Image (cartoon, rainbow, N blue to C red):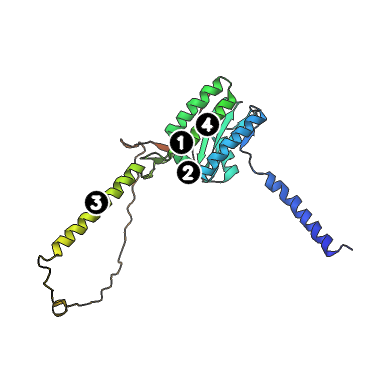
Amino acid sequence: MMSKKSLSIFFLLAISLLWTPIVGAATPTINDDANLFTSEQVNTLNQQAKEINEKIKGQVFIVTTTSNSSEPRDFADNYLRTAIGNDQNGSVLLLDMGQREIYISTSGNMIDYLTDRRIDSILDDVYDQMTNANYYAAAQAYLTNASTYVDEGVPGGHYRIDEATGKITRYKVLTTVEIVIALVLATVLSIAFYMITVSRYQLKSGTYKYPFREKASIKLTDKTDRLTNSFVTTRRIPKAPPPGSGGGGSTTHSSGGGTFGGGGRSF
């Protein structure tokens, strides 16, 4: 008969065996099914991605494939959703060697960091390297540009636009200059208000004392406000973004219950 100690060891081993495949199922940062990178290159890309992950509090990925038969956008969205879940912070670069397609899918705050304009800029650099078979340089271009844009922050005047409905959601971002100006104006107005108040109530003769006890009076009354009705007004914003939209926006679409941004091109 097994002792209590032996039973404890047995159960611990059983639990560890059951837990191992779960831990091992985590999506790798670099999934190079097409064998485009050396092991040293993968290590370097992993380090670059790790630095971005810390900034966005999420995960970025690179996946290469030669066997994908679905639409690159669908593949990339599904890959990102499987890796991090719907609407979590992250992005993935898909290098589809079978269909000769590049696609970047974004989720969470990466939708706002990587606007349509910024994604086009990244794709320009990635495309140049892919057409010259410089696959490692293409992956580096994606990570380097993404890191730069995250450091720059969400551009002023940024908005999201739903490609299906045309609904625009604006995001107000205060720049450093705007914050400084607001603080200076607030300080100036506060000082001005104080000086005006003091000068208005300050008597010319400092010896006069106002008989406030004899002159003062106070009367308190109860008043209750009742909410009788409320109204909510909604309106659909036109699909075309208005002029003067600043740093541009991010086109989004729904997939599998999540919201994604992104863009791609052939090479």
| SS at circle 4 | helix
Tell us which disc is closer to us: 3 or 1.
3
What is the crowding at mark 3: few (fewer than 14 residues within 10 Å), some, or many (at least 20)?
few
Residue at the spot 63% in from the left edge and 41% down from the top edge: 27
Residue at the spot 18% in from the left edge and 61% down from the top edge: 197
Please name whichever residue, 212 or 100, is drawn nearer the observer in this view of the structure.
212
Could you tell me how far apart the alpha carbons at marks 3 and 1 are, in whole angstroms? 35 Å
The disc at residue 188 is: 3
Amino acid, disc 2:
Asn
Q: Earlier in the sequence, mark 1 or mark 2?
A: 2
Tell us which disc is closer to us: 1 or 2.
1
- Residue beneath disc 2: 109
Could you tell me how far apart the alpha carbons at marks 4 and 2 are, in whole angstroms? 17 Å
- Residue beneath disc 4: 142
Amino acid, disc 3:
Val
- Residue beneath disc 1: 149
Residue at the spot 14% in from the left edge and 62% down from the top edge: 200
Could you tell me how far apart the alpha carbons at marks 4 and 1 are, in whole angstroms? 11 Å
Could you tell me how far apart the alpha carbons at marks 4 and 3 are, in whole angstroms? 46 Å
The disc at residue 121 is: none
Amino acid, disc 1:
Tyr
Tell us which disc is closer to us: 3 or 2.
3
Q: Position of residue 266 (x, y in %)?
A: 52, 25
What is the crowding at mark 1: few (fewer than 14 residues within 10 Å), some, or many (at least 20)?
many
Could you tell me how far apart the alpha carbons at marks 1 and 2 are, in whole angstroms? 12 Å
What is the crowding at mark 4: few (fewer than 14 residues within 10 Å), some, or many (at least 20)?
many
**Farthest top residue?**
132
